[in-house]
Image (tube, rainbow, N blue to C red):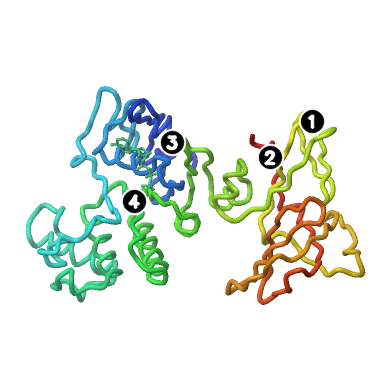
């Protein structure tokens, strides 16, 4: 909703180590009940950003606001324990010497009866009330994770910071725990900043994704927009395998073996990369040396020879060596399609799914 005060806002947050800005003018805001994922490769500065918001690391510049009030800038520094920020980190284990009830009650104050009632409510939310008197070692990994969530949410934090919270769980359990966690977080109205290096996790959890690289946020938006309108070639490649077809621009157009592509605003003679995901190529049979007819949607077919084909479960991945320049191109098709190496086939690319970027380097 426009005009709503963000629960969490950071402005130009910067942190330098040994002269290098590992977090470089990072700004973002999160509304109550919204989940934002800070997504990026290892070492891009995600955890450092989170640590500054939590108050366990000082920024060199920038400000942090909660509900419109500054909690940290060059003059103010609200200590970590007064920020009402919940934390859930991968290695943020339960206290092994405390029962489930005492773990969840850990950050609570007030009369014992009230604390007990709050613990029961929180365990109900994560469907673990029956384990109230159990010890952490009696619970599975997923159950422990849900208790950790109940513990983090029990004091009613305004913001939850989560750093790769699901990475210790096996795949199938992880999907289930993510869904439960998301439902509980949404219900609590907390603003969530979740750090992950896994695009699938971000797509699954986030209302908003902030894509981070080398200390900077390079793109921010809804998962759909980040996936379908990426800012550059690396942003496409972060979410999936990509094929890159290099071309040179003449008169805002580039000629390729797959047909012509528009390159508006790019100067004559400049190289461009046409980037296409493997699932957006179409494969067609060779008809005595010719392919299918060119169409407006799919451009001109180009011929390649199968290098290898693998069955991946839901789809088959076929790799081609292209006749025109010897480059390798990957295409995926649903179900089982395993042509023999050496077989000539024709490829077309879905023109509406191509991204054209000025070539880097
Ligand atoms: N206390 C420190 N002293 C010096 N350099 C540091 C310190 N903390 C972090 N760095 C460096 O800052 C960069 C960003 O680290 P950070 O942990 O924030 O990245 P990340 O994106 O969270 O990575 P990962 O996903 O691997 O945890 C890294 O190059 C790291 O080596």
Answer yes or no: disc 1 within 8 Å of ligand 1: no
Q: Do the residues labelled 4 and 2 touch (CB within 8 Å)?
A: no
Answer yes or no: disc 3 within 8 Å of ligand 1: yes
Q: Which of marks 1 and 4 is nearer the N terminus?
A: 4
Per the image, label 3 sits on a secondary structure element best described as loop
Q: Do the residues labelled 3 and 4 touch (CB within 8 Å)?
A: no
Per the image, label 4 sits on a secondary structure element best described as strand
Answer yes or no: disc 4 within 8 Å of ligand 1: yes
Q: Distance between the residues labelled 4 and 2?
A: 32 Å
Q: Which residue is drawn at 64% across and 53% down?
A: 242
Q: Badge 4 is on which residue?
A: 163
Ligand 1, seen in the image, is in the quarter at top left
Q: Earlier in the sequence, mark 3 or mark 2?
A: 3
Q: Do the residues labelled 1 and 4 touch (CB within 8 Å)?
A: no
Taking the view exactly as shown, the residue that stands out farthest to the left is 112
Q: Badge 2 is on which residue?
A: 357
Which image quarter: residue 335?
bottom right
Q: Distance between the residues labelled 1 and 4?
A: 45 Å
**Between 276 and 31, the one nearer to me in the picture:** 276
Q: Earlier in the sequence, mark 3 or mark 4?
A: 4
Q: Badge 3 is on which residue?
A: 215
Q: Are marks 3 and 2 in contact (CB under 8 Å)?
A: no
Q: Earlier in the sequence, mark 1 or mark 3?
A: 3
Circle 2 crowding by C-alpha within 10 Å: few under 14, some 14–19, many from 20: some
Q: How far apart are marks 3 and 2 (CA)?
A: 22 Å
**Between 291 and 251, the one nearer to me in the picture:** 291
Q: Badge 1 is on which residue?
A: 269
Q: Residue at x 38, y 31 (%)?
A: 13
Q: Which of marks 1 and 3 is in front?
A: 1
Circle 4 crowding by C-alpha within 10 Å: few under 14, some 14–19, many from 20: many
Q: How far apart are marks 1 and 2 (CA)?
A: 14 Å
């Amino acid at each position: 909703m426009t005009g709503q005060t963000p629960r969490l806002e950071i402005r130009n947050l910067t942190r330098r180590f040994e002269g290098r800005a590992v977090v470089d003018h990072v700004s973002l805001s999160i509304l109550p009940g919204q989940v934002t994922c800070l997504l990026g490769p290892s070492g891009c500065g995600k955890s450092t950003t989170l640590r500054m918001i939590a108050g366990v690391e000082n920024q060199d510049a920038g400000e942090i606001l909660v509900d419109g009030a500054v909690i940290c800038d060059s003059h103010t520094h609200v200590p970590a324990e007064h920020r009402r920020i919940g934390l859930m980190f991968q290695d943020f284990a339960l206290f092994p010497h405390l029962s489930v009830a005492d773990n969840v009650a850990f950050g609570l104050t007030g009369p014992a009866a009230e604390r007990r009632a709050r613990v029961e409510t929180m365990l109900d939310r994560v469907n673990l009330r029956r384990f109230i008197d159990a010890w952490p070692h009696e619970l599975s990994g997923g159950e422990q994770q849900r208790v950790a969530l109940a513990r983090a949410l029990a004091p009613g934090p305004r913001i939850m910071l989560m750093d790769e919270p699901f990475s210790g769980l096996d795949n199938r359990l992880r999907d289930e725990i993510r869904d439960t966690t998301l439902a509980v977080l949404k219900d609590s109205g907390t603003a969530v900043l979740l750090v992950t290096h896994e695009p699938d996790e971000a797509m699954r959890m986030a209302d908003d994704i902030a894509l981070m690289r080398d200390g900077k946020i390079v793109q921010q938006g809804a998962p759909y927009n980040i996936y379908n309108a990426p800012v550059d070639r690396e942003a496409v490649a972060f979410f999936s395998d990509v094929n890159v077809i290099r071309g040179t621009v003449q008169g805002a157009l580039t000629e390729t073996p797959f047909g012509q592509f528009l390159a508006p605003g790019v100067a004559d003679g400049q190289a461009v990369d046409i980037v296409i995901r493997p699932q957006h190529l179409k494969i067609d049979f060779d008809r005595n040396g010719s392919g299918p007819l060119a169409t407006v949607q799919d451009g001109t077919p180009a011929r390649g020879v199968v290098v290898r084909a693998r069955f991946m479960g839901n789809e088959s991945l076929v790799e081609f060596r292209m006749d025109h320049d010897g480059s390798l191109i990957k295409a995926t098709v649903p179900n089982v399609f395993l042509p023999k190496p050496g077989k000539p086939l024709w490829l077309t690319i879905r023109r509406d799914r191509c991204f054209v970027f000025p070539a880097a380097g």
